[in-house]
Image (cartoon, helix red, strand yellow):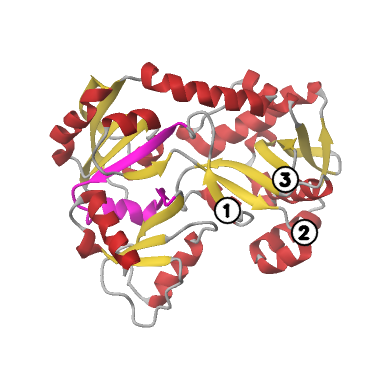
Amino acid sequence: MALILQTWMRWLMRIMLPFSRWRVPVVLLRGPDRASGREVHLLGAGWGYDFIRERFFASEPAVVRTVTVPVWRLERLLGDWRAQAALTVIGIDRVSSRVFLRRRYLAVPMSVGSLMEVPKDMKAFARQRKNCAADIRRVRIRKLDAHFSRDEEDFDLFYDRFYKPHVSRRHGSLAVVGARARIRLIFKSGMLMWITRNGELLAASIEIVRGKDYYRMVNGVMDGRADLLVEGVLSATYVYSIEKARALGCTRIHMGGNEPSPHDGVFRYKNKWATDITLNDSILGGNCILLLDWNQLAGPVADFFSHTSLFHHDMGGFSALWAFPHSEPLTAENLERQYKRLKTHGLHSFHILLPGGVPVDFVCPSEVHLIPLPVVNTGGPEGLTSYLRGKKRA
């Protein structure tokens, strides 16, 4: 019932969003950038780009100018203000972006989802993924157990003591705590998985089964305790989700949404288990998009991409864009080490901006495209995509 309602709401929002948000807030922000501390400007329009704003600035920026305009005047206003900003980001519904925005942007999903094909042989899977094997061993060593419940009385305990404090503590100022009524509706369509040790409740997650698909919806840790995270109680929810999915004959596990960046900590953890990346088809994630633009790629924008790589839409799927940090020596060892940390399953390509030439002894993986930053520095996202199209034709 919860998934059916969410699907219905998603389609309703797709129709209503262009009308409900036809006036768009635009703001020019100024503050120190996260990489160098120098003063930079970001031009923001619309909604849903808090993640990028938080990662772009080292501290809360000051508002230089702000105005609200009808969506059909948005691109003209951005054209007037764009020269003042290092980076422009627009959060807008997909219908309005197609109708009113003609400029070429880097199209970034609001959020992405992690998907896992349920392994037929858990031991073989663990041998291929050492980090997952370590989590499986830790669950056994810590003697973490699991049981499932559909008891209505368990829900309020989960929401108040597990879910809400965990989300608030883990995501800080960016935390979005789901309304009790909405999370209860999800629970009514699924079940609670409790992680315990010697009968003590330590963590929990709400899981839903639909046919061959197994959905991990929301999770939480007792009082949001950091020490329990270190002990691996959330790892236990993944291990027992896989066991439950296999027992029920499911073939895929949907792990929920993440920020659209390989640098996001939650995404990196899920990527240990995931076999693919998908669009997080939530009400906002499925109907809205982030559009990025810049005047010059070198400088503050490349610095931003060096610590906050982004997924972007590409050929019906996703690719990633990351800039090698100019503060580090560009050696084959450094390049390989950092790429392995960010490597993501299920991407078309991983685009890496290099401040200098390719290290002579670097063995480039087939999915990686190395891009000389000086070649694509000007021309905004269109210059970058034109270069990549030329490389693919070659």
Using the image, determine if residue 220 lies above or below residue 309.
Answer: above
Chain part drawn in magenta: 287-315
Q: Can residue 112 be seen in this view?
A: yes
Using the image, determine if residue 385 lies above or below residue 172.
Answer: below
- Which residue extends farthest front? 393
What residue is disc 2 on? 120
Secondary structure state at the residue bearing disc 2? loop
Q: Can residue 47 be seen in this view?
A: no
- Estimate the x, y position of residue 105 in percent, counting from the top left: 29, 44
- Say what amino acid the circle numbered 3 marks: Thr
Q: Which residue is drawn at 68% across and 45% down?
A: 228
> Closer to the N terminus: mark 1 or mark 2?
2
Q: Which residue is drawn at 78% across and 26% down?
A: 154
**Residue 34 magenta:** no
What residue is disc 1 on? 276
**Residue 305 magenta:** yes
- Say what amino acid the circle numbered 1 marks: Asp
Viewer-nearest residue: 175 or 108: 108
Query: Splitting the image into 4 quarters, where does residue 30 fall?
Result: top left
> Closer to the N terminus: mark 1 or mark 3?
3
Which quarter shows the N terminus?
top right
- Estimate the x, y position of residue 269 in percent, counting from the top left: 58, 52
Distance from Cα at disc 1 to Cα at disc 2: 17 Å
